[in-house]
């Protein structure tokens, strides 16, 4: 049987993949929102810096003498990071009057253009004063925003990737725990067969699987009804056949007694023998039919000790007292098997041992408390290649004993159905 892919693995992949995609989507959305927030906050910082620096720059410009050169304001910070604010003050002609030391000749927006702008990898904010005679531009390198966004992404992704393996493992464990009901159902269905058609319990079964269980139970109920009808037919057929065959045997035996010639008596004897063999064969065929079609496993464990004693006592009477030695346990013989099927199995085993064993040695029958049967007789060993075929219907070994070759096939059918 070709097995499909594992449902648990597929669910784990789908759920785990969905969780990963959802987390990544959440991170991307968070980074986009964070980028917008960083741009807004830094732009507001540029604007605030320009508004604070402009009055100071105006005072400084008016207090010093204009010698036509740009004055560079010293920077007390020793940091060389490109993220420091850079500012430039120009007059209406575009001449630089004042600049921070970090200014390195970056392109600037046209004089008189105020507000936010971007030039050569810098975000800028320009502010004019004195009716456009002075323009201050405060700028910051774009790498600052990229660095902030990168650090934020690392802080977001690091815990996610640290937790992700544990989340996937937790998903796998949860699926394994929750889907164990499928394994239990599979084991219960696998144990069912022609020998055990008891309904599967729906206790603790998830709602999604309850429909399957109910369908399987309905199917087994229909199968059980069909097998029960077959068992009743076999039982009725055995009863209906037994009477006419017995009557025919009696008539043949009467012909033997009333025959006027030895030839007629011999033929009547042959007819009686054929009818006797037919009676045995019909009984074995009906037993085989019941073994293959009836419910062998019963729904409850019961004591089979009385069944064992009844079968052995009957065989001892019909086959001769003293030929069968029975050993039973001190306690009960308890097993979940149909008593009729158990009796048929035991009878065929002992009959086979009696038919093919030495008449000088008894057949030893031992039954354990769990219903296990061991039958021993004294006979010539059967070759292994022959032994493997003896459980097939109508297969017999090299023997002159009477038989139909069905006894061990009946035993095998019942034993397999009983597990």
Image (spheres, helix red, strand yellow):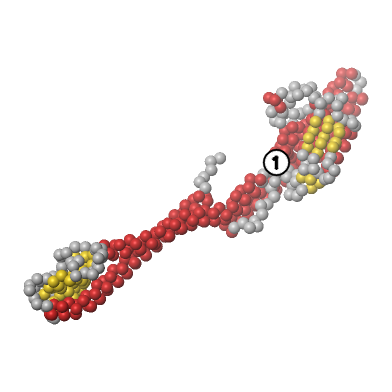
Image-quadrant location for residue 86: bottom left
Task: Pick whichever, 307 or 125, lies toward us.
Answer: 125
SS of the residue under disc 1: loop
Q: Residue at x 15, y 78 (%)?
A: 60
Q: Is residue 287 left or right of residue 15?
A: right
Q: Is residue 41 above or below residue 295?
A: below
Image-quadrant location for residue 232: top right
Q: Quadrant of the N terminus?
A: top right
Q: Quadrant of the C terminus?
A: top right
Task: Pick whichever, 267 or 198, lies toward us.
Answer: 198
Badge count: 1
Image-quadrant location for residue 394: top right
Q: Is residue 272 above or below residue 224?
A: above
Tell me residue 200's x, y (percent): 66, 52
Judge whether residue 373 can be spotted in this image: yes
Q: Residue at x 27, y 64 (%)?
A: 144
Tell me residue 386's x, y (percent): 70, 25
Tell me residue 53's x, y (percent): 21, 76
Judge whether residue 25 can be spotted in this image: no
| Residue with the mark numbered 1 | 419
Q: Is residue 213 left or right of residue 277?
A: left
Q: Residues within 10 Å of mark 1 (few under 14, many from 20)?
A: few
Tell me residue 134's x, y (percent): 13, 77
């Amino acid at each position: 049987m070709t097995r499909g892919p594992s449902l648990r693995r597929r669910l784990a992949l789908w759920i785990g993949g969905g969780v990963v995609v959802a987390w990544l989507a959440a991170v991307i959305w968070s980074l986009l929102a964070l980028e917008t927030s960083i741009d807004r906050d830094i732009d507001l910082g540029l604007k605030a810096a320009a508004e604070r620096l402009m009055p100071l720059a105006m005072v400084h410009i008016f207090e010093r003498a204009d010698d036509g050169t740009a004055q560079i304001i010293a920077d007390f910070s020793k940091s060389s990071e490109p993220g420091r604010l850079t500012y430039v003050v120009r007059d209406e002609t575009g001449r630089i009057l004042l600049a921070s030391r970090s200014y390195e000749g970056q392109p600037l927006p046209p004089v008189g253009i105020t507000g936010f702008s971007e030039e050569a990898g810098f975000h800028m904010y320009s502010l004019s004063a004195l009716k456009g005679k002075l323009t201050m531009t405060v700028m910051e390198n774009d790498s600052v925003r990229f660095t902030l966004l990168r650090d934020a992404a690392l802080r977001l992704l690091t815990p996610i990737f640290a937790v992700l393996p544990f989340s996937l493992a937790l998903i796998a464990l949860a699926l394994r725990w929750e889907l164990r009901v499928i394994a239990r159902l599979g084991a219960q269905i696998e144990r069912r067969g022609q020998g055990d058609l008891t309904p599967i319990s729906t206790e603790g079964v998830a709602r999604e699987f309850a429909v399957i269980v109910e369908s399987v139970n309905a199917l087994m109920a229909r199968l059980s009804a069909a097998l029960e009808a077959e068992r009743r037919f076999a039982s009725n057929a055995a009863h209906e056949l037994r009477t006419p065959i017995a009557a025919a045997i009696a008539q043949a035996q009467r012909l033997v007694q009333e025959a006027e010639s030895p030839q007629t008596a011999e033929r009547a004897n042959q007819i009686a023998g054929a009818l006797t063999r037919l009676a045995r064969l019909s009984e074995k065929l009906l037993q085989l039919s019941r073994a293959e079609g009836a419910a062998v496993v019963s729904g409850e464990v019961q004591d089979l000790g009385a069944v064992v004693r009844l079968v052995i006592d009957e065989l001892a009477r019909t086959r001769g007292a003293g030929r069968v030695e029975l050993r039973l346990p001190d306690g009960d013989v308890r097993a979940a098997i149909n008593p009729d099927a158990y009796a048929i199995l035991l009878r065929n085993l002992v009959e086979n041992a009696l038919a093919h064993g030495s008449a000088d040695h008894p057949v030893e029958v031992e039954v354990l408390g769990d219903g296990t049967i061991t039958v021993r007789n004294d006979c010539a060993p059967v070759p292994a290649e022959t032994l493997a075929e003896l459980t097939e219907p109508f297969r017999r070994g090299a023997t002159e004993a009477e038989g139909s070759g069905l006894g061990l096939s009946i035993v095998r059918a019942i034993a397999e159905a009983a597990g």
